[in-house]
Image (cartoon, rainbow, N blue to C red):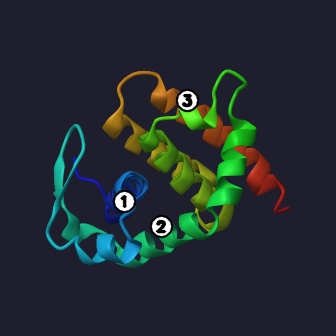
Amino acid sequence: MSKNSKSLTRLVIVQALYQMEMAGTDVSDIVNSLGDRLIFDNNFDYLISHIRKKLLKDTINGVIDNQSQIDSIIKKNLSSNWSFNRLDKILKAILRAAVYEISYKLRTPSKVIINEYIDITHSFYSQKEPEFVNAILDKIAIVERESDG
């Protein structure tokens, strides 16, 4: 099985957002350092040369530019027993990237975006997190996409 370049790019986006949150790394440093680095998930290792740099830059910059709005959308849709500040940093990165795409990349069907980010969640977690991500993104997609008419 192989991932397509968009799926791979989304996985790198999540890793980059995580790296930025943990180490304060600049976007351009991340993009410029990609080269032939490997990315890892639980099942496969991939060469980064297969990613789409434009999608990577657009999405990361979109998340950064709209982060307070994206975070507030996530907070509004968390169930009452979850605190945004308690979320794992990888989960935050996954949700931020997915919410950005759902809210701003309107040409991509929300089901496609949600499925991609659930797959990515499976790359990092094996417990309840993929269901958690699915439930939140489904709620957000309904609100965000319906409000666009």
Residue sitting at 78 percent across and 48 percent down?
A: 143
- Which structural element holds mark 1? helix
Residue sitting at 24 percent across and 68 percent down?
A: 50
Q: Residue 62 in the image: state x and y as whole percent.
A: 56, 69
**Can residue 125 be seen at all in this image of the molecule?**
yes
Q: CA distance from mark 2 to mark 3?
A: 23 Å
Q: Which residue is mark 1?
A: 16
Specify the amino acid type for callout 3: Phe
Specify the amino acid type for callout 1: Ala
Q: CA distance from mark 3 to mark 1?
A: 22 Å
- Circles 2 and 1: CB distance less than 8 Å? yes
- Which structural element holds mark 2? helix
| Disc 1: CA contacts within 10 A as few (<14), some (14-19) or many (>=20) | many
Q: Earlier in the sequence, mark 3 or mark 1?
A: 1
Mark identifier at residue 60: 2
Q: Which residue is mark 3?
A: 132
Quadrant of res 104: bottom right
Residue sitting at 20 percent across and 71 percent down?
A: 49
Q: Residue 101 in the image: state x and y as whole percent.
A: 58, 60
Q: Residue 63 in the image: state x and y as whole percent.
A: 56, 63
The extreme front residue here reads: 24
- Which structural element holds mark 3? helix
Residue 48 lies, with reference to residue 35, above or below; the image says: above
Q: Earlier in the sequence, mark 2 or mark 1?
A: 1
- Describe residue 105's horizontal placement relative to residue 147 as left or right: left
Residue sitting at 27 percent across and 78 percent down?
A: 32
- Across the whole image, how many numbered discs are drawn on residues? 3
Specify the amino acid type for callout 2: Ile
